[in-house]
Amino acid sequence: MTIAFRLGSIVQDSATGFKTLSAGPTGANNYETMESDRSGAGAGGGTDYQVPAGRTFTIAKIIYRGENAGADFMIGYGDDAVANGVAAPTNPVGLTADGVFAAPTAHTTYSVDVYLVVPAEKYPYVKVSGTTWCNIIALGYEV
């Protein structure tokens, strides 16, 4: 009997490559690298996630919540990690358009299946487009 693990559109025969990343940029046009462990919005202090050499990280699901109605954000990757702030990573590449993920109602959790691939040795980030912060969880698979 084969056991399959499914996350969004990704189906694997092992759960060992699944990862949970999070970010919580706190202001308009702020960037923040996704972290593998963190303590809250804008808190940082976690471990900035870099895709290992020779691997890719595919984001399959985004779970998010905005502090205020109208919070929105985008996802991308860059060559280096950035703390919560207006400084962009070196060579940023947007995987989505600005504001593509929106939280029309404050303090409401949203979940979206996606298929976003971050290449080897890059740092995935979140950029808030609106005027408020969001808590974002990215679920994916490293292969």
Image (cartoon, rainbow, N blue to C red):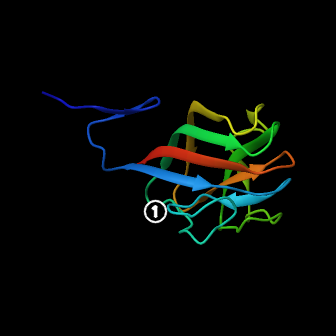
The number of discs equals: 1
Residue sitting at the far left = 1
Circle 1: residue type: Pro
- Residue at horizontal 84 percent and vertical 54 percent from the top: 29
Residue sitting at the far front = 107
Any part of residue 120 in sight: yes
Q: Which residue is mark 1?
A: 52
Any part of residue 98 in sight: no
Point out residue 76 in the picture as x, y percentages from the top left corner. 68, 49
Q: Residues within 10 Å of mark 1 (few under 14, many from 20)?
A: some
Left or right: 62 in relation to 125: left
Q: Quadrant of residue 77?
A: bottom right
- Residue at horizontal 67 percent and vertical 35 percent from the top: 108
In this view, the residue in front, 107 or 49, is 107
Point out residue 93 in the picture as x, y percentages from the top left corner. 71, 51
- Residue at horizontal 47 percent and vertical 51 percent from the top: 20
Q: Quadrant of the N terminus?
A: top left
Q: Quadrant of residue 14?
A: top left
When the figure is inspected, residue 85 is found, relative to residue 142, above or below; the finding is: below
- Residue at horizontal 70 percent and vertical 60 percent from the top: 32
In this view, the residue in front, 50 or 69, is 69
Point out residue 31 in the picture as x, y percentages from the top left corner. 75, 58
In this view, the residue in front, 125 or 26, is 26
Point out residue 40 in the picture as x, y percentages from the top left corner. 62, 60
Q: Tag 1's secondary structure?
A: loop
